[in-house]
Image (spheres, rainbow, N blue to C red):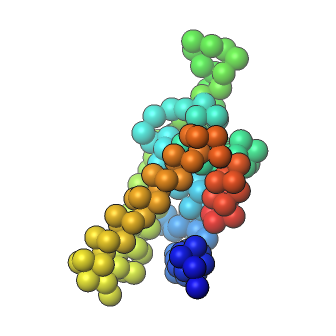
Amino acid sequence: MTEASRILDCFAALRRALGGEVPAGGTESISIAQLHALRTLDEADRTAGELARAIVVSLPSLTQLVDGLVERGYVARRTDPDDRRKVRLSITVRGRDLYHRARQAAEARIDDLLQDLTPEQRTALVEGLEALHSAIHAQWRAGQGRSVTAAAVRAG
């Protein structure tokens, strides 16, 4: 079994363990992709292109994702005051509250999954995932975004 095959198997198991939606209290939940978009917008307002690059998804996929967040009142579209041709995306108060609740729920679920690992295994896992994250973004910046985006969209 190749390293790539082993990693894909691990990602599939992780997706099954986490589920497709992150609960945010009550009846509200959001997808992992929406969680990433809200996290990025919680850091700063962005254009659609900036957000797509930050979360490594294609612009058409991002449009669909953002439309759902706007419809639910979690994200607002605003005209850029410096360039009226641009639209900036910003997280709303409701979206920020949902993001923080969903983030806590996701972290708690991952903490549960990590309980059976030794401290050394946890450290190795985090360091390995951070290295993979850096490699994905480096490929994206180097212009190989199409293949990375397709993989990111399929994964989640």
Q: Which residue is rendered at x = 58% and y = 40% of the image?
A: 142
Would you place residue 26 above or below residue 74 in this image?
Answer: below
Would you place residue 79 above or below residue 5 in this image?
Answer: above
Q: Position of residue 146 (x, y in %)?
A: 71, 48
Considering depth in this image, is 98 or 36 the residue closer to the camera?
36
- Residue 70 is left or right of residue 32, and the answer is right
Residue extending farthest to the front is 2
Is residue 80 visible in the rendered image? The answer is yes
Q: Position of residue 94 (x, y in %)?
A: 50, 46
Q: Which residue is rendered at x = 63% and y = 58% of the image?
A: 152
Q: Which residue is rendered at x = 59% and y = 57% of the image?
A: 33
* Residue 87: quadrant of the picture: top right
Position of the C terminus by quadrant:
bottom right
Q: Position of residue 103 (x, y in %)?
A: 43, 60
Give the number of callouts.
0
Considering depth in this image, is 8 or 114 the residue closer to the camera?
8
- Residue 72 is left or right of residue 110, and the answer is right
Q: Position of residue 58 (x, y in %)?
A: 70, 46
Residue extending farthest to the left is 119
Considering depth in this image, is 148 or 60 the residue closer to the camera?
148
Position of the N terminus by quadrant:
bottom right
Residue extending farthest to the top is 82
Would you place residue 151 above or below residue 90 in this image?
Answer: below
- Residue 96 is left or right of residue 118, and the answer is right
Is residue 103 visible in the rendered image? The answer is no
Q: Which residue is rendered at x = 58% and y = 73% of the image?
A: 4
Considering depth in this image, is 149 or 144 the residue closer to the camera?
144
